[in-house]
Amino acid sequence: MLDSEPAPSARERHMKVVAMKLRQIMRADPLRIEASETVQRAAGRMAAAAIPAALVIENGHLVGVLANRDISQKVVAKLLDPALTPVSDIMSPDPVRICDDREVESAILVMRARRVQELVVQDFAGKLIGIVCGCDLCNGQWEDA
């Protein structure tokens, strides 16, 4: 029988995860949706890509984030017609940005302080390269970390 190292404790795994860089966990090349698109079309594209949030673009510039939560709370719960409602009416405007070299712990603190569940990830040059959602931080994929 071979001696093996003891499995890392939950605390050790947690410390390793929170020290990871956002570039390691972000959803790269996020879906981009035009602000003028209908919620129905945007929701279909998000469902097809199996993602919880997308960047909203207008005239080539980031203007917001559309999350499943926006669709359920601002369209479905209010009985709006998704085929007639533009994304710009329900998106979360002015998304919070964070640099890809920041640690996961920093992203968690920013999300808590700003009361957001999505962060737009950019590189040092300001190029949009990804998105991190709250569900990405707690979905269990880090168990092997």
Image: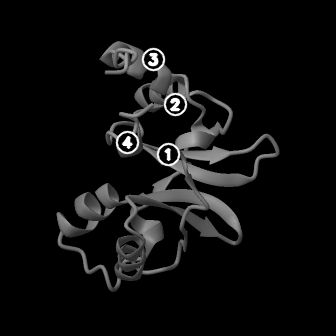
The image quarter containing residue 53 is bottom left
Q: Residues within 10 Å of mark 1 (few under 14, many from 20)?
A: many
Residue placed farthest to the right in the image? 125
Q: What secondary structure is marked by label 4? A: loop
Q: Mark 4 or 1 closer to N-term?
A: 1
Q: What secondary structure is marked by label 1? A: strand
Residue depicted at x 32% and y 60%: 68
The image quarter containing residue 125 is top right
Whole-percent x, y for residue 65 in the image? 49, 57
Label 1 sits on residue = 132
CA–CA distance between discs 1 and 2? 8 Å
Q: Looking at the picture, does residue 111 appear above or below residue 72?
A: above
CA–CA distance between discs 4 and 1? 14 Å
Whole-percent x, y for residue 90 in the image? 39, 63
CA–CA distance between discs 4 and 3? 15 Å
Q: What residue type is labelled 4?
A: Gln
Q: Determine which of the numbered discs, if any, sits on residue 11 in the image.
A: none
Q: Nearer the viewer, residue 145 or 119?
A: 145
Q: Which amino acid does label 1 sit on?
A: Val
Q: Mark 1 or 2 closer to N-term?
A: 2
Q: Mark 2 or 4 closer to N-term?
A: 2
